[in-house]
Image: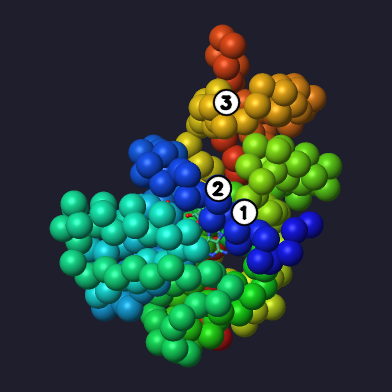
Amino acid sequence: MQNKKTIHSTVRNQFSQHADYYAQSSVHAKGDTLNALLDFADPKGTEQTLDIATGTGFTAFALAPKVAHVVATDLTPEMVEKAVELAQQQAIKNIAFSVAAAEALPFADASLDLVTCRLAPHHFQDVRAFLSEVHRVLRTDGLFCMNDSVSPESEKLRAWQNRVERLRDNSHVYGYPPSQWDAMITDAGFSLEKTAHTRNAQMSFLWWVRPEKNPPEVVQEIRDAFAQLSPDEAREHYTVQPEGDDFYFSWPTYTVKARRR
Ligand SMILES: C[S@@+](CC[C@H](N)C(=O)[O-])C[C@H]1O[C@@H](n2cnc3c(N)ncnc32)[C@H](O)[C@@H]1O
């Protein structure tokens, strides 16, 4: 396992090259995960909001018209730069940006009403430090709404999925199963109000595996790993649908609404 400093530089290295790719990714732009998060957040228009690991800003931009103000943060300066450019193009006024790690947030204690984080904690080295920081910056009764790709509860599939994700992208740290998220969020001082098993959009394997970046032997290793799943595992956990030389699939995701105690 890489140490925290190394993981942060691996993440920056990975995402600094992909700001345009993310900005154009329909998997990140829409789908169940964004709708579920907005539904759980259910803003009233008065919230001082923070979106952690905003990437190129999809979640922050969807929240901006529904809250008083959003600060969008991310570890990777190039992602933040792209988000700033997109916010200007979309004339979003009630938004500010900051380069910051999820594990060390540059905000005062109890200064926020709503914190969101979507499709990112599987890149965080220290998820407990992230949860502790979210707890610190939220006021009592403030809301934390999070969504992330998760692994199944089965130990075998948990190991399988995390290995495959890391093969494709070495900035993947760990996709926890829902039961571990529930325990960690509760331990960090939140009450779980709602949870939902969601999914990201169906993705083409040949698109997702990034053949332009990963060498053919790694692409083949990942393809072979999918072929080793049983038909039931492939269908039930990963919605695998063959299509010619390609196949479509999705990762399970988990959406959480938690109230700061
Ligand atoms: C999949 S993208 C973000 C998706 C975005 N939340 C959305 O809704 O479209 C993951 C982002 O997490 C950021 N990231 C990874 N580790 C981080 C950390 N420890 N602290 C803050 N941001 C981090 C990366 O720089 C990247 O921009």
State left or right for residue 10 relative to residue 36: right
Q: Residue at x 65, y 26 (%)?
A: 215
State left or right for residue 243 relative to residue 113: right
State left or right for residue 235 relative to residue 85: right
Neighbour tally class for label 3: few under 14, some 14-19, many 20 plus, Cα within 10 Å: some
Q: Nearer the viewer, residue 179 or 171?
A: 171
CB under 8 Å between discs 2 and 1:
yes
Color style of the picture: rainbow
Q: Secondary structure at mark 2?
A: helix
Mark 1 and ligand 1: say if the CB distance to the nearest ligand atom is below 8 Å.
no
Instruction: Give the quarter of the image for residue 183.
Output: bottom right
Residue hosting label 2: 14
**Residue 68, relative to residue 84: is it above or below?**
below
Q: Position of residue 65 (x, y in %)?
A: 22, 63
Residue hosting label 3: 211
Mark 2 and ligand 1: say if the CB distance to the nearest ligand atom is below 8 Å.
yes
Q: Residue at x 29, y 59 (%)?
A: 84
Residue hosting label 1: 10
Tag 1: amino acid? Thr
Tag 2: amino acid? Gln
Q: Which mark is residue 129?
A: none
List the single residue furthest toward the top: 244
Among the two numbered marks 1 and 3 on one chain, the one whose residue lies closer to the N terminus: 1
Q: Secondary structure at mark 3?
A: loop
Tag 3: amino acid? Pro
Q: Nearer the viewer, residue 66 or 206?
A: 206
Name the quarter where the N terminus is drawn.
bottom right
Spatial distance from mark 2 to mark 1, Cα to Cα? Answer: 6 Å
Q: Position of residue 168 (x, y in %)?
A: 65, 37
